[in-house]
Amino acid sequence: MNNLLRNSTALCSSVCIVGKNTSYSFFDGKENPNNYVSWEAYKFINKITKRKEENVDKNVIGDLVKNNHKFYKKKLLCRGLEIKGSKKVDDKSFYIACDRIQRMLRHSSENVTKNLIKNDVGFNLIAKSEQMTDLPEHCHMKDVKGGYSGRGNMVNKCRGMRHGQNVFCGEENLIQQGLKTEYSPNIKDIFIHETSHAIMGDGVDGKTQEDINKVFKDAKSTNNLWKKPNGKNAYALSNSKEYFAELSMWLFGGHGDYANIENKIPKPGPGGLSEYDNDGFKLICDIYNGIREIPFDVSKERVYQPIVEISKSEEPDEFFSRIPSSKNGPPKNKKVTLSFQLKNKNDNSEYLVSWLNYKGEKRWGFLINKDCPKFNTSTFVGHSWLIEKKTKDGCCQVIKAFVAEDYEKGICFI
Ligand SMILES: [Zn+2]
């Protein structure tokens, strides 16, 4: 009997299947609430579950709560990280997302989680009935051809993305995995892929990022891995970030873009990965299993002053001519973070922040407003960012521009 009870309590804390498949709930009172279990057995189980509860950090998996946001009405705190979604997102999706996060972070250095929290990493779920561009962070991209890069697909039907400090994922990837959807066959762990991007970008230190890059380069040039039989690259060969995200999908039991789709190589799961790309496997194992020490991110923030602000009498052309053009290449190729933040929380205006390329042309951009008050982005020292205010007729009025300085993290108040 004791063995049976131990097995049961190991699997569950509040509801147990004991004896004749009876559903059994524990209550705080001292009465034995269930006639199917002996009083002695009840006391035994209760003692174990109580002890377990005392040891649990209450913030690990919170309750699904109402959120005071115009769009994201539901929120779950998971290991201190926020998972948000509109009222259309199924409650189950939040708990599954949290379980995936837990699985990915539970053995890694505690500082990985702390860094993610410090860097405001959040998880935004997209309901099955919603499109990416229904979400406030992406609404300005609705029906925009070429998407964010100008050369890719429209954002509307995208079901997974890391955008700024946030991970976006369609809930069907969590609760209906394996069932084909109108968007995809839904067989890959998109949530794990996108979360890995956040872990690499905001959870680990620069040295670890460099080491991932080194193993990626070796896989590409020295070991000639991740090449398809037709000579094309598997997605893991895109860059070191995609390499880490794709390998993470294998490590957590799934697979990414196969090097050989016909023979399913690498085989799904960690065993297949270790056989195919052992160096990559070892490195990502050490990150996820905690062998690799990850330091706490102590990079200091500095509030930037805009490099230029438009004056009342100034024409936009004059204003643009005063913005230094973004420069590429050495010696100014150092990567830094810029955090764009709404200064006044009650400001009802909407701002478009765009990267300006070296010709002064607007490229990649994102929205800042009351509903999306913060956006962290990587950029290079010397690169310029333009702030425009949306006016009533939908057109934009240029306001000011910032230039990334040689400082780890710059705060740009709007
Ligand atoms: Zn990716």
Image (cartoon, grey):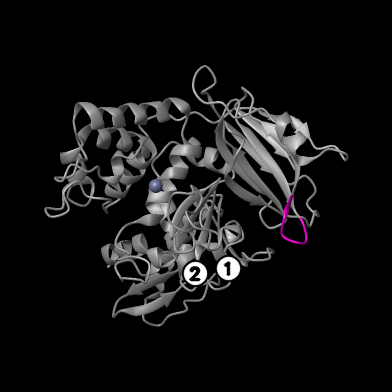
Confirm whether the magenta stretch covers residue 395.
yes
* Horizontal arrangement in the rendering, residue 228 relative to residue 316 (left or right): left
Of residues 388 and 167, the one drawn nearer to the viewer in this rendering = 388
Report, in whole angstroms, how far the alpha carbon at label 2 lies from the one at label 1.
7 Å
The span picked out in magenta is 391-396
Of residues 386 and 84, the one drawn nearer to the viewer in this rendering = 386
**Label disc, if present, on residue 86 of the rendered structure:** 1
What is the three-letter code of the residue carrying label 2?
Ala
Check disc 1 and report its element: helix, strand or loop. loop
Count the numbered circles shown: 2
The extreme bottom residue here reads: 35
Instruction: Tell me, yes or no, if residue 309 can be seen here.
Output: yes
Q: Quadrant of the N terminus?
A: bottom left
The residue where tag 2 is placed is: 127
Which x, y percent locates residue 354? 62, 43
Q: Quadrant of residue 226?
A: top left
**As drawn, 198 above or below 190:** above
Of residues 95 and 266, the one drawn nearer to the viewer in this rendering = 266
* Horizontal arrangement in the rendering, residue 366 relative to residue 99 (left or right): right
